[in-house]
């Protein structure tokens, strides 16, 4: 059994939850968490407003304005994740870079000489990043690859009437969610939940997909360290990439689910 020095690349809270599981894996000798901003391209205020309106609609604009009033001073990038990591995983080393592909970040990653990279909740990485760890990088994807690659876990499954959401642990490659699969499991999805289906999906992601995904990644890392990890190539002829669900699509989902609750038309 090998002991692995692991680097975790993330831009979201789910990365901190994953770090909590990885520090408990006996085969992980050290863990470094490297956070980043999810939006790498600078955006003007008008572009930001348009983006919020497209994804969240008028309610999202209202929430963003209220948050700006409540916290007029912007915090340094990565500060929230750094504080959360310090509380949940004291002693774990933390670094922050606005872009993983910048020279200074690449140099720092090489200096760490990690055995394995673990990736969750970040943007598409180039080979200059994911090829640095000796054993490459594994990605935690909340969706059944290759049929449900991309964003918005559970949303398109519910919209299309698929009663299960997959969680996939796969190799990072230069194509989105397309690398070889190490582990994959499915979890039941209520296609006509009570209440707002969008709120249900948020709870479902938080209570089902995230903890099971963290468990599966910890298992995959342990298997890899023990030389027990199998891997299967994806059939990319069946692949379909899903974009982040828009406000209009969420309204359509609510209409579809309301129709299901009424049952089939005689």
Image (tube, rainbow, N blue to C red):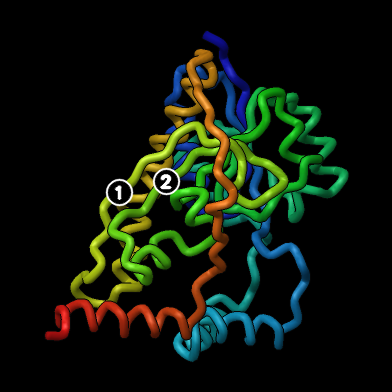
Residue pictured at 59% horizontal, 23% vertical: 30
Residue pictured at 62% horizontal, 22% vertical: 5
**Which residue in the rendered view is the most extreme toward the right?**
103
Q: Which mark is residue 167?
A: 2
Question: Height in image: 223 above or below 152?
Answer: above
Residue pictured at 50% horizontal, 23% vertical: 230
Instruction: Specify few, some or many for label 2: CA neighbours under 10 Å numbering under 14, 14-19, or 20 or more.
Output: many
Q: On the image, which quarter does residue 260 sit in?
A: bottom left
Residue pictured at 48% horizontal, 56% vertical: 148
Which of pointers 2 and 1 lies earlier in the amino acid sequence?
A: 2
Q: Which mark is residue 100?
A: none
Question: Height in image: 194 above or below 181?
Answer: below
Question: Height in image: 190 above or below 232?
Answer: below
Q: Is residue 87 left or right of residue 71?
A: left
Where in the figure is residue 210, as x and y percent of width and height? 40, 49
Residue carrying label 1: 187
**Which residue in the rendered view is the most extreme toward the left?**
266
Q: Nearer the viewer, residue 78 or 120?
A: 120
Q: Secondary structure at mark 1?
A: strand
Where in the figure is residue 9, as x and y percent of width and height? 63, 43
Question: Height in image: 2 above or below 22?
Answer: above
Q: Secondary structure at mark 2?
A: strand
Q: Is residue 176 left or right of residue 209?
A: right
Say whether marks 2 and 1 touch (CB < 8 Å).
Answer: yes
Quarter occupied by the C terminus: bottom left
Alpha carbon separation for disc pair 2 and 1: 8 Å
């Amino acid at each position: 059994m090998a002991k692995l020095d692991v680097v975790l690349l993330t831009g979201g809270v789910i990365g901190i939850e994953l770090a909590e599981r990885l520090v408990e894996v006996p085969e992980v000798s050290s863990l470094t968490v490297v956070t980043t901003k999810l939006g790498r391209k600078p955006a003007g205020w008008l572009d930001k407003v348009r983006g919020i309106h497209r994804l969240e609609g008028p309610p999202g604009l209202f929430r963003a304005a209220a948050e700006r009033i409540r916290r007029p001073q912007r915090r340094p990038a990565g500060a929230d994740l750094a504080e959360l990591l310090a509380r949940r995983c004291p002693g774990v080393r933390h670094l922050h870079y606005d872009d993983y592909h910048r020279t200074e970040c690449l140099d720092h990653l090489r200096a760490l000489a990690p055995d394995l990279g673990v990736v969750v909740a970040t943007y598409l990485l180039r080979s200059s990043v994911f090829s640095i760890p000796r054993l490459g990088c594994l990605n935690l994807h909340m969706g059944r690859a290759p049929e449900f690659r991309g964003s918005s876990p559970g949303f398109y499954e519910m919209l299309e009437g698929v009663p299960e959401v997959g969680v996939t642990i796969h190799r990072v490659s230069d194509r989105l969610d397309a690398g070889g699969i190490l582990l994959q499991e499915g979890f039941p999805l209520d296609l006509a939940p009570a209440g707002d289906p969008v709120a249900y999906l948020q709870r479902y992601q938080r209570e089902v997909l995230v903890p099971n995904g963290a468990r599966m990644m910890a298992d995959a890392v342990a298997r890899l360290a023990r030389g027990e990890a199998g891997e299967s190539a994806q059939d990319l002829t069946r692949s379909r990439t899903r974009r982040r669900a828009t406000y209009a699509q969420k309204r359509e989902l609510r209409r579809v689910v309301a129709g299901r609750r009424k049952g089939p038309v005689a």
